Image (spheres, rainbow, N blue to C red):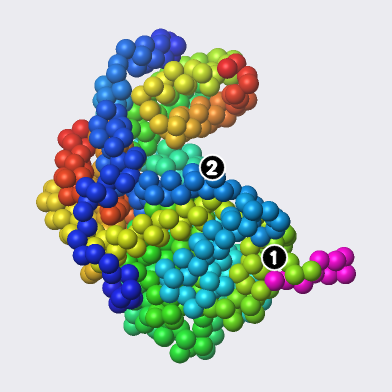
Amino acid sequence: MADTVSDHTNSTVLDVDAVRRDFPILSETVYGKPLVFLDSGASAQKPRQVIDAMRHCMEHQYSNVHRGAHYLSAATTDAFEQARDRVARFLNAASPDEIIFTSNVTAAINLVAHAYGRAFLKAGDEVIVSEMEHHANIVPWQLLAEATGVVLRVAPVEDDGSFRIERFAELLNDRTRLVSITHCSNVLGTNVPAKEVARLAHDAGAKVLFDGAQAVVHGPVDVQYIDADFYGFTAHKLYGPSGLGVLYGKLDILNSMPPFLGGGDMIDKVSFKGSTFKEAPHRFEAGTPAIVEAIGLHAAINYVADIGFDAIRAHEAGLRDYAHERLSAIDGMRLIGTAPDKAAIISFLVDGLHPYDVAAVLDRQGVACRVGHHCAEPLMDRLGIIGTVRATLAMYNTKAEIDVLGEAIEKAKKMLA
Amino acid sequence: MAREEYEDFAETLEALDDDMRFEFLLDLAKKQDATDFPEEWKTDANLMHGCMSKVWLVHEEKDGLHWFKGASEAAIVKGLVHMMVRSFSGLTSEEVREISLDDVRRLNLGALTFQRQVGMMAMLKQIQKLAGQPVARESAGA
Protein backbone atom coordinates (compact mmCIF):
# COMPACT_ATOMS: atom_id res chain seq x y z
CA MET A 1 0.00 0.00 0.00
CA ALA A 2 1.35 3.39 -0.93
CA ASP A 3 -0.16 5.36 1.92
CA THR A 4 2.45 4.57 4.51
CA VAL A 5 4.42 6.61 6.96
CA SER A 6 7.46 5.61 8.90
CA ASP A 7 6.55 6.60 12.45
CA HIS A 8 4.20 3.66 13.03
CA THR A 9 6.87 1.05 12.64
CA ASN A 10 7.92 -0.32 15.98
CA SER A 11 8.41 -4.06 15.92
CA THR A 12 8.72 -6.42 13.03
CA VAL A 13 7.29 -9.75 14.09
CA LEU A 14 3.92 -10.19 15.70
CA ASP A 15 3.74 -12.68 18.57
CA VAL A 16 0.22 -13.91 17.90
CA ASP A 17 0.03 -16.01 21.08
CA ALA A 18 0.85 -12.95 23.16
CA VAL A 19 -1.68 -10.86 21.23
CA ARG A 20 -4.38 -13.49 21.74
CA ARG A 21 -3.78 -13.49 25.49
CA ASP A 22 -4.68 -9.79 25.48
CA PHE A 23 -8.17 -10.52 24.11
CA PRO A 24 -10.20 -12.27 26.83
CA ILE A 25 -13.07 -13.23 24.53
CA LEU A 26 -10.85 -15.33 22.28
CA SER A 27 -10.72 -18.07 24.91
CA GLU A 28 -14.51 -18.48 24.83
CA THR A 29 -16.15 -21.56 23.36
CA VAL A 30 -19.33 -21.65 21.28
CA TYR A 31 -21.41 -24.82 20.92
CA GLY A 32 -18.64 -26.47 22.94
CA LYS A 33 -16.02 -25.61 20.32
CA PRO A 34 -13.20 -23.05 20.50
CA LEU A 35 -14.34 -19.72 19.09
CA VAL A 36 -12.77 -18.90 15.71
CA PHE A 37 -13.62 -15.25 15.30
CA LEU A 38 -13.39 -14.18 11.66
CA ASP A 39 -15.85 -11.30 11.79
CA SER A 40 -13.57 -8.47 12.86
CA GLY A 41 -14.46 -6.52 9.72
CA ALA A 42 -17.93 -6.07 11.19
CA SER A 43 -16.54 -5.24 14.63
CA ALA A 44 -13.25 -6.27 16.19
CA GLN A 45 -12.79 -7.77 19.65
CA LYS A 46 -11.30 -5.67 22.43
CA PRO A 47 -7.96 -6.16 24.19
CA ARG A 48 -7.78 -6.06 27.97
CA GLN A 49 -5.93 -2.73 27.69
CA VAL A 50 -9.03 -1.10 26.19
CA ILE A 51 -11.40 -2.74 28.65
CA ASP A 52 -9.17 -1.72 31.58
CA ALA A 53 -8.86 1.89 30.41
CA MET A 54 -12.63 2.23 30.11
CA ARG A 55 -13.28 0.53 33.43
CA HIS A 56 -10.64 2.68 35.13
CA CYS A 57 -12.30 5.83 33.82
CA MET A 58 -15.73 4.76 35.07
CA GLU A 59 -14.42 3.57 38.44
CA HIS A 60 -12.06 6.41 39.26
CA GLN A 61 -12.40 9.41 37.03
CA TYR A 62 -15.71 9.68 35.23
CA SER A 63 -17.58 12.94 34.88
CA ASN A 64 -18.99 15.02 32.05
CA VAL A 65 -16.47 16.98 30.00
CA HIS A 66 -15.93 20.64 29.12
CA ARG A 67 -18.26 22.14 31.71
CA GLY A 68 -17.79 21.02 35.29
CA ALA A 69 -16.01 23.23 37.82
CA HIS A 70 -14.61 20.28 39.73
CA TYR A 71 -11.70 17.90 39.86
CA LEU A 72 -13.28 14.91 38.11
CA SER A 73 -14.62 16.96 35.25
CA ALA A 74 -11.24 18.56 34.67
CA ALA A 75 -9.52 15.17 34.80
CA THR A 76 -12.01 13.60 32.40
CA THR A 77 -11.83 16.59 30.05
CA ASP A 78 -8.04 16.20 29.99
CA ALA A 79 -8.34 12.50 29.22
CA PHE A 80 -10.95 13.14 26.53
CA GLU A 81 -8.83 15.80 24.83
CA GLN A 82 -5.74 13.61 25.12
CA ALA A 83 -7.69 10.99 23.18
CA ARG A 84 -8.36 13.56 20.48
CA ASP A 85 -4.68 14.40 20.42
CA ARG A 86 -3.81 10.70 20.14
CA VAL A 87 -6.19 10.30 17.18
CA ALA A 88 -4.59 13.33 15.52
CA ARG A 89 -1.15 11.75 15.84
CA PHE A 90 -2.51 8.38 14.68
CA LEU A 91 -3.71 9.97 11.43
CA ASN A 92 -0.86 12.50 11.34
CA ALA A 93 -3.35 15.36 11.31
CA ALA A 94 -1.84 18.83 11.52
CA SER A 95 -3.83 19.64 14.64
CA PRO A 96 -6.15 17.92 17.14
CA ASP A 97 -8.70 20.58 16.17
CA GLU A 98 -9.09 18.66 12.92
CA ILE A 99 -10.44 15.61 14.79
CA ILE A 100 -14.20 15.49 15.33
CA PHE A 101 -15.71 12.74 17.43
CA THR A 102 -18.87 11.31 15.89
CA SER A 103 -20.81 8.16 16.69
CA ASN A 104 -19.45 6.12 13.76
CA VAL A 105 -18.31 6.49 10.15
CA THR A 106 -21.92 6.69 8.99
CA ALA A 107 -22.36 9.77 11.16
CA ALA A 108 -19.06 11.20 9.91
CA ILE A 109 -20.13 10.90 6.26
CA ASN A 110 -23.60 12.26 7.01
CA LEU A 111 -21.96 15.20 8.76
CA VAL A 112 -19.99 16.05 5.62
CA ALA A 113 -23.01 15.46 3.37
CA HIS A 114 -25.10 17.87 5.45
CA ALA A 115 -22.68 20.51 6.66
CA TYR A 116 -20.38 20.62 3.64
CA GLY A 117 -22.72 19.27 0.96
CA ARG A 118 -25.69 21.51 1.63
CA ALA A 119 -23.54 24.59 2.12
CA PHE A 120 -21.24 24.25 -0.87
CA LEU A 121 -22.80 21.90 -3.45
CA LYS A 122 -25.61 22.87 -5.79
CA ALA A 123 -27.75 21.35 -8.54
CA GLY A 124 -25.63 19.89 -11.32
CA ASP A 125 -22.50 19.54 -9.19
CA GLU A 126 -21.13 16.00 -9.18
CA VAL A 127 -20.15 13.69 -6.34
CA ILE A 128 -18.18 10.56 -7.22
CA VAL A 129 -18.40 7.34 -5.22
CA SER A 130 -17.39 3.83 -6.32
CA GLU A 131 -19.25 0.61 -7.00
CA MET A 132 -17.75 -0.96 -3.89
CA GLU A 133 -19.05 1.50 -1.33
CA HIS A 134 -20.74 0.55 1.89
CA HIS A 135 -24.31 1.90 2.01
CA ALA A 136 -23.03 4.47 4.52
CA ASN A 137 -21.14 6.10 1.66
CA ILE A 138 -24.01 5.91 -0.82
CA VAL A 139 -27.24 6.80 0.93
CA PRO A 140 -26.11 10.15 2.45
CA TRP A 141 -25.19 11.30 -1.07
CA GLN A 142 -28.48 10.07 -2.50
CA LEU A 143 -30.29 12.09 0.18
CA LEU A 144 -28.14 15.09 -0.69
CA ALA A 145 -28.90 14.57 -4.39
CA GLU A 146 -32.64 14.51 -3.70
CA ALA A 147 -32.42 17.65 -1.60
CA THR A 148 -30.12 19.71 -3.83
CA GLY A 149 -30.01 18.24 -7.33
CA VAL A 150 -26.39 17.15 -6.94
CA VAL A 151 -25.55 14.31 -9.35
CA LEU A 152 -24.04 11.06 -8.09
CA ARG A 153 -21.47 9.37 -10.34
CA VAL A 154 -20.09 5.90 -9.76
CA ALA A 155 -16.52 4.77 -10.38
CA PRO A 156 -16.35 1.17 -11.62
CA VAL A 157 -14.75 -1.86 -10.04
CA GLU A 158 -13.17 -4.64 -12.11
CA ASP A 159 -14.43 -8.23 -12.07
CA ASP A 160 -11.58 -9.31 -9.78
CA GLY A 161 -12.41 -6.46 -7.39
CA SER A 162 -9.53 -4.24 -8.38
CA PHE A 163 -9.86 -0.49 -8.74
CA ARG A 164 -8.36 1.08 -11.83
CA ILE A 165 -7.35 4.66 -11.27
CA GLU A 166 -7.60 5.53 -14.98
CA ARG A 167 -11.25 4.50 -15.08
CA PHE A 168 -11.90 6.63 -12.00
CA ALA A 169 -10.07 9.57 -13.64
CA GLU A 170 -12.43 9.40 -16.63
CA LEU A 171 -15.30 10.51 -14.39
CA LEU A 172 -13.60 13.68 -13.21
CA ASN A 173 -14.64 16.93 -14.89
CA ASP A 174 -15.20 20.58 -14.09
CA ARG A 175 -18.51 19.76 -12.37
CA THR A 176 -16.89 17.33 -9.92
CA ARG A 177 -17.02 18.90 -6.46
CA LEU A 178 -16.47 15.95 -4.18
CA VAL A 179 -15.04 12.45 -4.34
CA SER A 180 -16.25 10.24 -1.48
CA ILE A 181 -14.69 6.84 -1.70
CA THR A 182 -13.71 3.90 0.42
CA HIS A 183 -10.03 3.56 1.28
CA CYS A 184 -10.47 -0.22 1.55
CA SER A 185 -13.51 -2.26 0.48
CA ASN A 186 -15.30 -4.02 3.32
CA VAL A 187 -16.30 -6.85 0.96
CA LEU A 188 -13.35 -7.25 -1.40
CA GLY A 189 -10.44 -5.98 0.67
CA THR A 190 -9.40 -3.87 -2.32
CA ASN A 191 -7.18 -0.95 -1.33
CA VAL A 192 -7.80 2.30 -3.16
CA PRO A 193 -4.65 4.35 -3.98
CA ALA A 194 -5.71 7.27 -1.81
CA LYS A 195 -2.89 9.67 -2.59
CA GLU A 196 -3.46 9.33 -6.32
CA VAL A 197 -7.23 9.66 -5.97
CA ALA A 198 -6.76 12.82 -3.89
CA ARG A 199 -4.28 14.31 -6.37
CA LEU A 200 -6.60 13.70 -9.33
CA ALA A 201 -9.62 15.01 -7.42
CA HIS A 202 -7.75 18.14 -6.38
CA ASP A 203 -6.53 18.70 -9.94
CA ALA A 204 -10.19 18.67 -10.98
CA GLY A 205 -11.01 21.20 -8.25
CA ALA A 206 -12.85 18.69 -6.04
CA LYS A 207 -12.53 17.82 -2.36
CA VAL A 208 -12.02 14.24 -1.29
CA LEU A 209 -13.39 12.16 1.56
CA PHE A 210 -12.15 8.66 2.40
CA ASP A 211 -14.18 6.06 4.24
CA GLY A 212 -11.38 4.54 6.28
CA ALA A 213 -13.47 2.13 8.37
CA GLN A 214 -11.51 -0.89 7.15
CA ALA A 215 -8.28 0.80 6.04
CA VAL A 216 -7.14 2.15 9.42
CA VAL A 217 -7.21 -1.36 10.86
CA HIS A 218 -4.87 -2.92 8.35
CA GLY A 219 -2.23 -0.25 7.77
CA PRO A 220 -1.02 3.21 8.74
CA VAL A 221 -2.86 6.23 7.37
CA ASP A 222 -1.25 9.66 7.02
CA VAL A 223 -3.92 12.19 6.07
CA GLN A 224 -1.34 14.86 5.24
CA TYR A 225 0.65 12.52 3.03
CA ILE A 226 -2.42 11.39 1.08
CA ASP A 227 -3.78 14.95 1.24
CA ALA A 228 -7.30 13.95 2.30
CA ASP A 229 -9.79 16.74 2.89
CA PHE A 230 -11.94 14.44 5.03
CA TYR A 231 -11.23 11.02 6.47
CA GLY A 232 -13.60 8.89 8.56
CA PHE A 233 -13.01 5.84 10.70
CA THR A 234 -14.64 4.09 13.60
CA ALA A 235 -13.25 2.94 16.94
CA HIS A 236 -14.97 -0.43 17.15
CA LYS A 237 -13.27 -1.91 14.11
CA LEU A 238 -9.91 -0.74 15.47
CA TYR A 239 -10.16 -2.91 18.60
CA GLY A 240 -11.84 -0.04 20.46
CA PRO A 241 -15.41 0.47 21.73
CA SER A 242 -18.57 0.84 19.67
CA GLY A 243 -20.46 4.12 19.61
CA LEU A 244 -17.54 6.32 18.61
CA GLY A 245 -16.36 7.41 15.19
CA VAL A 246 -13.88 9.97 13.96
CA LEU A 247 -14.10 12.54 11.22
CA TYR A 248 -10.84 14.19 10.23
CA GLY A 249 -11.21 17.38 8.21
CA LYS A 250 -8.75 20.05 7.15
CA LEU A 251 -9.18 22.88 9.61
CA ASP A 252 -9.94 25.66 7.12
CA ILE A 253 -12.62 23.51 5.48
CA LEU A 254 -14.17 22.56 8.82
CA ASN A 255 -14.29 26.18 9.97
CA SER A 256 -15.96 27.20 6.71
CA MET A 257 -18.79 24.72 7.30
CA PRO A 258 -22.00 25.48 9.18
CA PRO A 259 -22.91 23.20 12.10
CA PHE A 260 -24.71 19.91 11.46
CA LEU A 261 -26.41 19.20 14.79
CA GLY A 262 -27.30 22.07 17.11
CA GLY A 263 -27.24 21.89 20.89
CA GLY A 264 -25.05 22.18 23.92
CA ASP A 265 -21.25 22.30 23.76
CA MET A 266 -21.10 23.53 20.16
CA ILE A 267 -22.20 27.12 20.76
CA ASP A 268 -20.28 30.27 21.38
CA LYS A 269 -23.27 32.30 22.53
CA VAL A 270 -27.01 31.60 22.51
CA SER A 271 -29.87 34.09 22.66
CA PHE A 272 -33.33 34.15 21.15
CA LYS A 273 -32.05 36.67 18.63
CA GLY A 274 -29.67 34.02 17.35
CA SER A 275 -26.69 31.90 18.27
CA THR A 276 -23.04 31.88 17.32
CA PHE A 277 -20.94 28.77 17.15
CA LYS A 278 -17.57 27.53 18.31
CA GLU A 279 -14.85 26.65 15.86
CA ALA A 280 -13.96 23.09 14.94
CA PRO A 281 -13.93 20.54 16.38
CA HIS A 282 -16.48 21.60 19.02
CA ARG A 283 -18.79 23.20 16.47
CA PHE A 284 -19.56 19.66 15.28
CA GLU A 285 -19.86 17.97 18.67
CA ALA A 286 -23.27 18.97 19.98
CA GLY A 287 -24.30 17.36 23.24
CA THR A 288 -22.39 15.09 25.59
CA PRO A 289 -19.90 13.06 23.56
CA ALA A 290 -18.93 9.41 23.94
CA ILE A 291 -16.50 10.11 26.77
CA VAL A 292 -15.50 6.67 28.02
CA GLU A 293 -15.39 5.45 24.44
CA ALA A 294 -12.88 8.16 23.47
CA ILE A 295 -10.67 7.00 26.33
CA GLY A 296 -11.10 3.44 25.06
CA LEU A 297 -10.10 4.49 21.57
CA HIS A 298 -6.99 6.13 22.96
CA ALA A 299 -6.04 2.82 24.57
CA ALA A 300 -6.85 0.94 21.35
CA ILE A 301 -4.61 3.18 19.27
CA ASN A 302 -1.81 2.80 21.82
CA TYR A 303 -2.28 -0.95 21.66
CA VAL A 304 -2.09 -1.05 17.86
CA ALA A 305 0.87 1.33 17.84
CA ASP A 306 2.73 -0.78 20.42
CA ILE A 307 2.41 -3.82 18.20
CA GLY A 308 3.19 -1.73 15.15
CA PHE A 309 1.71 -1.70 11.69
CA ASP A 310 4.79 -3.31 10.13
CA ALA A 311 4.18 -6.38 12.26
CA ILE A 312 0.40 -6.28 11.81
CA ARG A 313 0.64 -5.96 8.04
CA ALA A 314 3.18 -8.73 7.72
CA HIS A 315 1.06 -11.01 9.90
CA GLU A 316 -2.17 -10.23 8.06
CA ALA A 317 -0.56 -10.58 4.64
CA GLY A 318 0.63 -14.04 5.67
CA LEU A 319 -2.88 -14.95 6.80
CA ARG A 320 -4.44 -13.56 3.63
CA ASP A 321 -2.11 -15.53 1.36
CA TYR A 322 -2.58 -18.69 3.41
CA ALA A 323 -6.37 -18.29 3.38
CA HIS A 324 -6.42 -17.82 -0.39
CA GLU A 325 -4.25 -20.91 -0.82
CA ARG A 326 -6.19 -23.05 1.68
CA LEU A 327 -9.64 -22.06 0.42
CA SER A 328 -8.69 -22.28 -3.26
CA ALA A 329 -7.87 -25.94 -2.68
CA ILE A 330 -11.56 -26.59 -1.93
CA ASP A 331 -13.47 -27.83 -4.95
CA GLY A 332 -16.17 -25.36 -6.01
CA MET A 333 -14.64 -22.45 -4.08
CA ARG A 334 -15.07 -19.01 -5.61
CA LEU A 335 -13.11 -16.18 -4.02
CA ILE A 336 -14.79 -12.81 -4.48
CA GLY A 337 -12.15 -10.08 -4.65
CA THR A 338 -8.60 -10.99 -5.58
CA ALA A 339 -7.09 -7.58 -6.26
CA PRO A 340 -3.32 -7.42 -5.78
CA ASP A 341 -2.16 -6.34 -2.30
CA LYS A 342 -5.67 -6.48 -0.93
CA ALA A 343 -6.39 -6.38 2.79
CA ALA A 344 -7.07 -9.62 4.69
CA ILE A 345 -10.80 -9.59 3.94
CA ILE A 346 -11.82 -12.87 2.32
CA SER A 347 -15.22 -13.03 0.66
CA PHE A 348 -16.26 -16.30 -0.92
CA LEU A 349 -19.02 -18.48 -2.31
CA VAL A 350 -19.19 -22.23 -2.67
CA ASP A 351 -20.73 -23.52 -5.91
CA GLY A 352 -24.28 -24.74 -5.45
CA LEU A 353 -24.57 -23.64 -1.83
CA HIS A 354 -26.41 -20.64 -0.47
CA PRO A 355 -23.99 -18.44 1.50
CA TYR A 356 -26.48 -18.29 4.37
CA ASP A 357 -26.34 -22.10 4.72
CA VAL A 358 -22.55 -22.16 4.56
CA ALA A 359 -22.33 -19.53 7.30
CA ALA A 360 -24.84 -21.45 9.42
CA VAL A 361 -22.75 -24.63 9.24
CA LEU A 362 -19.57 -22.65 9.96
CA ASP A 363 -21.30 -21.16 12.99
CA ARG A 364 -22.04 -24.67 14.31
CA GLN A 365 -18.30 -25.39 14.05
CA GLY A 366 -17.51 -22.33 16.16
CA VAL A 367 -16.44 -20.25 13.15
CA ALA A 368 -17.93 -16.75 13.22
CA CYS A 369 -18.18 -15.23 9.74
CA ARG A 370 -20.46 -12.64 8.29
CA VAL A 371 -22.91 -13.47 5.52
CA GLY A 372 -25.07 -11.38 3.21
CA HIS A 373 -24.57 -8.31 1.11
CA HIS A 374 -22.39 -6.61 3.73
CA CYS A 375 -24.27 -3.31 3.31
CA ALA A 376 -22.98 -3.17 -0.27
CA GLU A 377 -25.96 -4.17 -2.40
CA PRO A 378 -24.83 -2.21 -5.47
CA LEU A 379 -21.55 -4.15 -5.40
CA MET A 380 -23.46 -7.46 -5.20
CA ASP A 381 -25.51 -6.37 -8.23
CA ARG A 382 -22.34 -5.37 -10.06
CA LEU A 383 -20.79 -8.79 -9.41
CA GLY A 384 -24.06 -10.61 -10.13
CA ILE A 385 -24.18 -12.39 -6.76
CA ILE A 386 -26.73 -12.46 -3.94
CA GLY A 387 -24.14 -12.10 -1.21
CA THR A 388 -21.00 -13.70 0.13
CA VAL A 389 -19.64 -15.37 3.20
CA ARG A 390 -16.94 -13.08 4.55
CA ALA A 391 -14.02 -14.01 6.76
CA THR A 392 -12.00 -11.03 7.93
CA LEU A 393 -8.59 -11.76 9.35
CA ALA A 394 -7.28 -9.62 12.16
CA MET A 395 -4.05 -9.35 14.11
CA TYR A 396 -5.20 -12.07 16.54
CA ASN A 397 -6.09 -14.69 13.95
CA THR A 398 -3.89 -17.68 13.16
CA LYS A 399 -3.21 -20.07 10.31
CA ALA A 400 -4.64 -22.84 12.49
CA GLU A 401 -7.94 -20.94 12.52
CA ILE A 402 -7.88 -20.75 8.73
CA ASP A 403 -7.48 -24.54 8.73
CA VAL A 404 -10.56 -24.79 10.96
CA LEU A 405 -12.39 -22.53 8.49
CA GLY A 406 -11.31 -24.73 5.57
CA GLU A 407 -12.42 -27.92 7.35
CA ALA A 408 -15.73 -26.31 8.30
CA ILE A 409 -16.38 -25.34 4.67
CA GLU A 410 -15.66 -28.92 3.62
CA LYS A 411 -18.09 -30.12 6.27
CA ALA A 412 -20.70 -27.67 4.98
CA LYS A 413 -20.28 -29.08 1.49
CA LYS A 414 -20.91 -32.60 2.80
CA MET A 415 -23.88 -31.65 4.95
CA LEU A 416 -25.58 -29.49 2.37
CA ALA A 417 -24.87 -31.64 -0.68
CA MET B 1 -54.32 -33.44 10.45
CA ALA B 2 -51.88 -30.54 10.37
CA ARG B 3 -51.97 -30.42 14.14
CA GLU B 4 -50.60 -33.95 14.19
CA GLU B 5 -47.74 -32.93 11.93
CA TYR B 6 -47.12 -29.91 14.13
CA GLU B 7 -46.97 -32.11 17.24
CA ASP B 8 -44.61 -34.51 15.43
CA PHE B 9 -42.22 -31.70 14.51
CA ALA B 10 -42.34 -30.14 17.96
CA GLU B 11 -41.83 -33.44 19.81
CA THR B 12 -39.02 -34.52 17.49
CA LEU B 13 -37.19 -31.23 18.00
CA GLU B 14 -37.62 -31.46 21.76
CA ALA B 15 -36.05 -34.94 21.77
CA LEU B 16 -32.98 -33.93 19.76
CA ASP B 17 -29.81 -32.16 20.81
CA ASP B 18 -28.71 -28.98 19.02
CA ASP B 19 -26.49 -30.69 16.48
CA MET B 20 -29.14 -33.26 15.63
CA ARG B 21 -31.80 -30.55 15.29
CA PHE B 22 -29.60 -28.87 12.74
CA GLU B 23 -29.32 -32.11 10.76
CA PHE B 24 -33.07 -32.67 11.13
CA LEU B 25 -33.71 -29.26 9.57
CA LEU B 26 -31.44 -30.08 6.66
CA ASP B 27 -33.32 -33.36 6.15
CA LEU B 28 -36.58 -31.41 6.09
CA ALA B 29 -35.03 -29.09 3.52
CA LYS B 30 -34.44 -32.07 1.25
CA LYS B 31 -38.08 -33.12 1.67
CA GLN B 32 -39.13 -29.59 0.85
CA ASP B 33 -37.02 -29.72 -2.32
CA ALA B 34 -39.12 -32.69 -3.41
CA THR B 35 -42.41 -30.80 -3.04
CA ASP B 36 -44.00 -29.00 -5.92
CA PHE B 37 -43.35 -25.26 -6.10
CA PRO B 38 -43.23 -24.17 -9.75
CA GLU B 39 -40.74 -21.50 -10.77
CA GLU B 40 -43.59 -19.26 -11.95
CA TRP B 41 -44.78 -18.96 -8.36
CA LYS B 42 -41.50 -17.33 -7.40
CA THR B 43 -42.79 -13.82 -8.08
CA ASP B 44 -42.30 -10.59 -6.20
CA ALA B 45 -45.94 -10.77 -5.14
CA ASN B 46 -45.30 -14.08 -3.37
CA LEU B 47 -41.99 -12.97 -1.90
CA MET B 48 -41.68 -12.22 1.78
CA HIS B 49 -39.71 -9.06 2.33
CA GLY B 50 -36.96 -8.56 4.85
CA CYS B 51 -35.57 -12.10 4.85
CA MET B 52 -31.84 -12.73 4.49
CA SER B 53 -32.60 -15.43 1.96
CA LYS B 54 -35.62 -15.27 -0.30
CA VAL B 55 -38.81 -16.93 0.93
CA TRP B 56 -41.94 -17.35 -1.19
CA LEU B 57 -45.30 -18.37 0.29
CA VAL B 58 -48.49 -19.13 -1.61
CA HIS B 59 -51.97 -19.82 -0.27
CA GLU B 60 -55.07 -21.64 -1.44
CA GLU B 61 -58.45 -21.97 0.27
CA LYS B 62 -60.41 -25.13 -0.46
CA ASP B 63 -63.65 -26.22 1.22
CA GLY B 64 -63.14 -23.78 4.05
CA LEU B 65 -59.58 -24.96 4.78
CA HIS B 66 -56.34 -23.05 4.20
CA TRP B 67 -53.38 -24.62 2.41
CA PHE B 68 -49.91 -23.13 2.12
CA LYS B 69 -46.87 -23.91 0.05
CA GLY B 70 -43.46 -22.36 0.34
CA ALA B 71 -39.97 -22.22 -1.08
CA SER B 72 -36.63 -20.68 -0.23
CA GLU B 73 -33.15 -20.41 -1.70
CA ALA B 74 -31.33 -21.49 1.43
CA ALA B 75 -31.48 -25.03 2.80
CA ILE B 76 -31.92 -24.19 6.46
CA VAL B 77 -34.72 -21.77 5.65
CA LYS B 78 -36.28 -24.43 3.41
CA GLY B 79 -36.40 -26.71 6.45
CA LEU B 80 -38.15 -24.01 8.44
CA VAL B 81 -40.56 -23.28 5.60
CA HIS B 82 -41.34 -26.99 5.39
CA MET B 83 -42.26 -27.16 9.07
CA MET B 84 -44.36 -24.02 8.90
CA VAL B 85 -46.41 -24.87 5.83
CA ARG B 86 -46.93 -28.51 6.87
CA SER B 87 -47.87 -27.54 10.41
CA PHE B 88 -50.30 -24.82 9.53
CA SER B 89 -51.99 -26.14 6.38
CA GLY B 90 -55.44 -27.76 6.40
CA LEU B 91 -56.73 -25.48 9.15
CA THR B 92 -59.98 -23.53 9.33
CA SER B 93 -59.88 -19.73 9.45
CA GLU B 94 -60.46 -19.83 13.17
CA GLU B 95 -57.61 -22.29 13.68
CA VAL B 96 -55.24 -20.16 11.58
CA ARG B 97 -56.25 -17.13 13.63
CA GLU B 98 -55.49 -18.95 16.85
CA ILE B 99 -51.92 -19.93 15.98
CA SER B 100 -49.79 -18.15 18.55
CA LEU B 101 -46.22 -16.99 18.64
CA ASP B 102 -45.60 -19.64 21.27
CA ASP B 103 -46.70 -22.32 18.80
CA VAL B 104 -43.97 -21.07 16.49
CA ARG B 105 -41.44 -20.86 19.32
CA ARG B 106 -41.84 -24.60 19.87
CA LEU B 107 -40.76 -25.14 16.25
CA ASN B 108 -37.94 -22.66 16.58
CA LEU B 109 -35.79 -25.11 18.54
CA GLY B 110 -34.09 -26.15 15.35
CA ALA B 111 -33.45 -22.62 14.19
CA LEU B 112 -31.10 -21.74 17.02
CA THR B 113 -30.68 -18.06 16.36
CA PHE B 114 -32.80 -15.08 17.20
CA GLN B 115 -32.61 -13.84 13.64
CA ARG B 116 -34.19 -17.04 12.36
CA GLN B 117 -36.83 -16.86 15.09
CA VAL B 118 -37.75 -13.43 13.77
CA GLY B 119 -37.96 -14.96 10.30
CA MET B 120 -40.30 -17.71 11.52
CA MET B 121 -42.54 -15.20 13.27
CA ALA B 122 -42.67 -13.25 10.01
CA MET B 123 -43.67 -16.46 8.20
CA LEU B 124 -46.52 -17.02 10.68
CA LYS B 125 -47.76 -13.48 10.16
CA GLN B 126 -47.60 -13.95 6.39
CA ILE B 127 -49.55 -17.21 6.67
CA GLN B 128 -52.24 -15.47 8.72
CA LYS B 129 -52.32 -12.53 6.36
CA LEU B 130 -52.68 -14.76 3.29
CA ALA B 131 -55.56 -16.54 5.03
CA GLY B 132 -57.22 -13.18 5.64
CA GLN B 133 -56.83 -13.46 9.39
CA PRO B 134 -55.48 -11.01 11.96
CA VAL B 135 -51.80 -11.64 12.73
CA ALA B 136 -50.59 -13.00 16.04
CA ARG B 137 -49.18 -10.53 18.55
CA GLU B 138 -47.05 -11.00 21.60
CA SER B 139 -49.88 -10.24 24.04
CA ALA B 140 -52.56 -12.32 22.33
CA GLY B 141 -52.61 -16.03 22.98
CA ALA B 142 -49.01 -16.04 24.24
Q: In the image, is residue A46 above or below residue A364?
A: below
Q: In the image, is residue A347 above or below residue B47?
A: below
Q: In the image, is residue B41 above or below residue A10?
A: above
Residue A312 locus on image (x, y percent):
26, 61
Residue A319 locus on image (x, y percent):
20, 56
Q: Earlier in the sequence, mark 2 or mark 1?
A: 2
The answer for which chain carries disc 1 is: A
Q: Quadrant of the N terminus of chain A?
A: bottom left
Q: Residue furthest right?
A: A273
Query: Which region is colored magenta?
Result: A270-278
Mark 2 residue type: Glu
Determine if residue A138 is in view: no
The reply to whether dot 2 and dot 1 touch (C-beta < 8 Å) is no
SS for tag 1?
A: loop
Res B76 quadrant in image: top left
The label shown at residue B81 is none
Looking at the rendered structure, the number of numbered marks drawn on it comes to 2
Q: Residue at x 45, y 90 (%)?
A: A203
Closest to the observer, A67 or B4: A67
The label shown at residue A266 is 1
Q: Is residue A7 left or right of residue A134?
A: left
